[in-house]
Amino acid sequence: MSKGSKKKTSRVRKRAQDARNDAFSHESARVFRAGKESGDTAPALAISADAQVNATVVSPYGMLCFVEMDGAELLCRVGDGLISGKSSILAPGDRVRVETLEGQLLVQEMQTRRTKLSRPSISVERAGGKRVTEQVFAANIDLLVVVAAAAKPAYKPRLIDRFLIAAEVGGVAPVLCVNKMDLVKSEPERIGPLRELGVTVLNTSCETGQGLDKLRALLRGKLSVFTGHSGVGKSTLVNALDPKHEIVTREVSDANEKGRHTTSTSRLYHLDNDIHIIDTPGIKQLGLWGVSREELAFYFPEIASAAESCRFRDCIHIHEPGCSVLAAVEDGTLSRHRYDSYLRIRETLKD
Ligand SMILES: Nc1nc2c(ncn2[C@@H]2O[C@H](COP(=O)(O)OP(=O)(O)OP(=O)(O)O)[C@@H](O)[C@H]2O)c(=O)[nH]1
Ligand SMILES: [Mg+2]
Ligand SMILES: [Zn+2]
């Protein structure tokens, strides 16, 4: 790399980081999000900031729920105030109040979530119409660990860009964990632009133990959630971090290189070293909840930064004259892959 291009990179990184800070502390974006939040919880749900909690949700189970209370794991019914459709709205990590009612354990109330990770959930109503609601799949977490495999299954970056956005929306810090490094000579190239944006990236291997101490250090004292495609090694990582856990894992089939969805429900685990992890089932796609087309660019810090010099304030960076984002893609200062990701995600969002 020449001296000149090095300089360019660091300037882009700095600008991107500034934009990240600016964009996400932007008052109008915050107000926009706050308005949406209050709309989502319009029905009288039993959620309150000062709920007198005595338990933590370990794993929701339809209209039932496993919680931990006083060191024991208990199966409870969930009160009507926390049910939407056919299942509870609870997620691992939720803080709740459990009461005994007529000899039955009942989750009565939930504390307002400090942070959350959500996706849209589409259900078909009796009348045949579709209803899209927010599905929270982890609550009160400090860290989102997006696990990807360097190989087997092949590294697929699209989901990662989406998870970075979901983390930002939910107020959670993201980490990218590139696992199965024993199967490759070097890290997949496409990770470069993410490192430049300041995303924390770890290379790990459950086979050789590479990176596990670094991962432990990052996870210590926090509640984290492991997410990503099926078969990338999320459950194997939890087992490797603390061998007292023996979560079932399964080989990725050679025929199609796909995981087999071995983990079927999300669940909270407590590990040594004050490490707390929610292991989740592998997913193929992640819909974005709480992001509109108009604000999407704010969630790509490097695009938000370049957009400051677009000729038109309402530029959507697709075909406008004087668009600095397009110019940055052309001259290589903005990753074409990340820009393609912006376009693809934009297509899936509503105005
Ligand atoms: N070579 C190698 N294989 C690994 C590594 N980590 C996990 N595996 C293997 O990858 C396969 C899938 O691992 P799992 O832990 O079940 O994957 P998962 O992400 O939990 O998958 P789902 O539960 O389906 O979402 C297993 O055969 C593991 O032994 C690694 O670092 N290197
Ligand atoms: Mg698993
Ligand atoms: Zn533009």
Image (cartoon, helix red, strand yellow):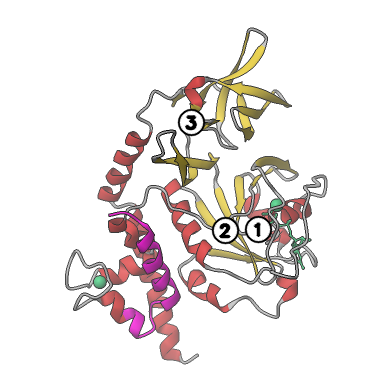
Whether residue 339 sits left or right of residue 184 in the image: it is left
Image quadrant for the C terminus?
bottom left
Which of the 4 image quadrants contains residue 269?
top right
Whether residues under marks 3 and 1 lie with C-beta atoms below 8 angstroms apart, the answer is no
Q: How many marks?
A: 3
* In the foreground, 248 or 222: 248
Mark 1: secondary structure:
loop
Of the image marks 3 and 1, the number of the one nearer the N terminus: 3
* Residue 332 locus on image (x, y percent): 39, 83
Gap in angstroms between the C-alphas marked 2 and 1: 8 Å
Residue at the image position 64 percent from the left and 43 percent from the top: 266
- Residue 181 image position (x, y, % from top left): 71, 71
Label 3 sits on residue: 85
Q: Is mark 1 within 8 Å of ligand 1?
A: yes
**What kind of element bears circle 2?**
loop
Q: Does any portion of residue 51 appear in the rendered image? A: no
Is 47 located above or below residue 122 in the figure? above
Q: Earlier in the sequence, mark 2 or mark 1?
A: 1
Q: Residue furthest front?
A: 127
Quick one: label 1, few (<14), some, or many (20+) residues within 10 Å? many
Q: Camera-side residue: 313 or 251?
A: 251
- From the image, give the main secondary structure of the stretch colored magenta: helix
Q: Which residue is mark 2?
A: 284
How far is disc 3 from disc 1 in space, using C-alphas? 27 Å
The circle drawn on residue 230 is: 1
Quarter occupied by residue 277: top right
Which SS class for mark 3? loop
Type of amino acid at the residue the image marks with label 1: Ser
Q: Which residues are magenta?
A: 328-351
